[in-house]
Amino acid sequence: MRLSDFFDTVYRPLRLRGRSQNTSRLHHAAITQFSRWLREQGIADDARLEHLDELVLARYLEHRAATRSPYTAERERSSLMALARLAWERRVPGLEQMPTCPPSVLPDRVPTAWSTEEMRRLFVAASRPRRSVGRIPEAEWFPAVILLGYETGERIGALMATPASDYRRPSLMVQPQARKGGRRGRVYSLSPELCDRLDLIVGYGYEMLLPWPGAPTHVYHRLRVILRDAGLAGKRLAFHQVRRTAISHIAAAGGDPVAFAGHASPGMTKRWYLDPRMAERGPKPHELLPKIEPDTAGGGTSGKDDRGAPSPAGPA
């Protein structure tokens, strides 16, 4: 049985009922990439249940970690193993044994955010005339998207899945089915400047608040052109960088970054979203440590021991 058929007819109805469309998209992407690698290796034209063999999976994930990133490989491992577990539980023909494929040990990346000056450069670059999004000029569409992501901290997938009817100036409601996890919706209060931009886009008469007539992945290609124009190009820099930036700036201003991000765990926010250059408060370690560099102006050290007390006098 093909993995894509098993996903569409068994896994998705049983495991993803009520979940967001993006969750299904990520599973489909994992299956597509696995099938592509199998073809390149001359193993098969399409991924089937029998290809969920632990050695085949190990080779594939090693390839993905080397050519993409360890995080991409781990996300795809999770998707493929979820399919394997359900197939094994239901004794679907083709999977002779449950593969053993433990999670990888992922490095802890330091989250980064754009500065205010960098965000302004991005906004200016997005406002330059280029092509169009359907009937909407890119110079109107992209600045509205960037400002909306910045003010709400919401994921781009959720914003693009929101119908225009859920926007009523000055509020935007993002329904649960559009958001990650598909369980909890949110209501955002927007600035007058952003509302003016959204009113302009809604005036074109599309059903969705941020319509994108082309393939969903093409929006990232168009964004990369804007990033290069702003001097901000980088492998991990895309719409999610706007979300990290907004969350980090909220923390730097003394707000609640966890509530703003909509996370259940403060650890999640700190590990993946908060740029420590902006978010960390209190004295820096070098400000707490006793100085050991000689005081050239005074002709010696500070005259205190490591407890802050005066140093004992030496022998006469």
Image: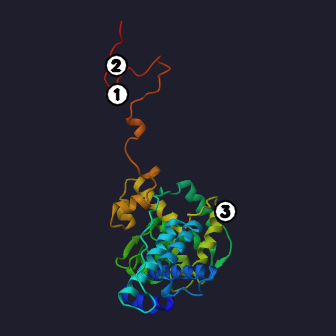
Choose the circle earlier in sequence order: 1 or 2.
Answer: 1
Q: Quadrant of residue 248?
A: bottom left
Q: Nearer the viewer, residue 178 or 42?
A: 42
- The image quarter containing residue 62 is bottom right
Q: How far apart are marks 2 and 3 (CA)?
A: 58 Å
Q: Is mark 2 on a helix, strand or loop?
A: loop
- Which element is circle 3 on? helix
Say whether residue 114 is visible.
yes
Q: Residue 229 carries which label?
A: 3
Query: Distance of mark 3 from mark 1, alpha carbons?
Result: 52 Å
Label 3 Cα neighbours within 10 Å, binned few <14 / some 14-19 / many ≥20 = some
Q: Residues within 10 Å of mark 2 (few under 14, many from 20)?
A: few
Would you name the residue on which mark 1 appears?
306
Three-letter amino acid code of the residue under disc 3:
Asp
First in sequence: mark 3 vs mark 1: 3
* Residue at 32 percent of width and 16 percent of height: 312
Query: In screen coordinates, is 157 left or right of 229?
Result: left
| Residue nearest the viewer, comparing 284 with 144 | 284
> Of discs 2 and 3, which sits in the foreground?
2
Q: Position of residue 61 (x, y in %)?
A: 52, 72
Q: Is mark 1 on a helix, strand or loop?
A: loop
Amino acid at the residue labelled 2: Ser
Which residue is the site of mark 2?
311
Q: 67 or 21, which is in the foreground? A: 67
Mark 1 and mark 2 residues within 8 Å of each other at the beta carbon: no
Residue at the image point whose x is 57% and y is 66% from the top: 66
Q: Residue at x 51, y 79 (%)?
A: 30
Instruction: Tell me if residue 127 comes above or below residue 20 in the rendering.
Output: above
As measured in the structure, the alpha-carbon distance from the residue carrying label 1 to the one carrying label 2 is 9 Å
